[in-house]
Amino acid sequence: SGKTIGKEISKDDLATHAVKEIVAMPKSDRSKRAAMGLQIFERSACTKCHTTATTTTLLAPSLKGVAAQKVEYLIESILYPSRIIKTGWEVELIELKSGRTLTGLVKDDGKHLRVLNLDKDERILKTDIDSRRLSKISVMPEGQHATLSRREFVDLIAYLQTLK
């Protein structure tokens, strides 16, 4: 299945490999590799949160226009999702007066806040909140690359480069 056998490749080595592969990729191969990347995007967890249309979802920004980003940024965003968190997509830690703690993306909803994460969408009264603070951890989980071979990872990047 093309998975790395034996020694697992480090994130930095994968990033270096992917940049080299993308730069060296012949134009004639790009559309075929991007088509494979689309399949990887759709079968991986990407579509659970991301859309490639103009609208964003509640959990993640749209990837439309992401092709304008440098290839290194695309790679880093997948390998290290918490390194650069796009403005408006910061995770918050909310402590309730009851002692309960919630973590997720927060949307203002009048007298309530909606706290969203990958498996929950909770509404809480603002008056029940004891404290709120930003987290340095992205809602996008670490390790998304771990289920992909090096070729599949490069194909995924090639696909992202088509999203104008």
Image: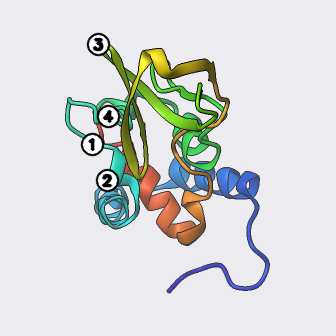
- Which residue is the site of mark 2? 47
Residue 57, picture quadrant: top left
User: Is disc 2 in contact with disc 3, using a CB cutoff of under 8 Å?
Assistant: no
Q: Quadrant of residue 36?
A: bottom left
The image shows residue 41, relative to residue 120, as above or below, that is below
Residue drawn at x 21%, y 30% is 55
Label 2 neighbourhood size at 10 Å, few (<14), some (14-19), many (20+)? few
Q: Earlier in the sequence, mark 4 or mark 1?
A: 1
Mark in front: 4 vs 1 = 4
Residue 95 placed where, x, y %?
A: 61, 28
First in sequence: mark 3 vs mark 4 = 4
C-alpha distance separating marks 3 and 1:
27 Å
Q: Say which mark, if any, is on residue 51.
A: 1
Residue 51 locus on image (x, y percent):
27, 42
Check if mark 2's residue and mark 1's residue have beta carbons within 8 Å: yes
Q: Residue at x 76, y 61 (%)?
A: 10
Q: Is residue 54 left or right of residue 12?
A: left
Residue at coordinates 37% horizontally, 65% vertically from top-left? 40
Q: Is residue 44 visible?
A: yes
Secondary structure beneath disc 3?
Answer: loop
Q: CA distance from mark 2 to mark 3?
A: 29 Å
Residue receiving disc 3: 110
Confirm whether residue 27 shows in the render. Answer: no
Q: Residues within 10 Å of mark 4 (few under 14, many from 20)?
A: some
Label 1: how many residues lie within 10 Å, few (<14), some (14-19) or many (20+)?
A: some
Q: Earlier in the sequence, mark 2 or mark 3?
A: 2
User: Residue 142's spot in the image, x, y percent?
Assistant: 62, 52
Badge 1 marks a residue whose secondary structure is loop
Q: Amino acid at mark 3?
A: Gly
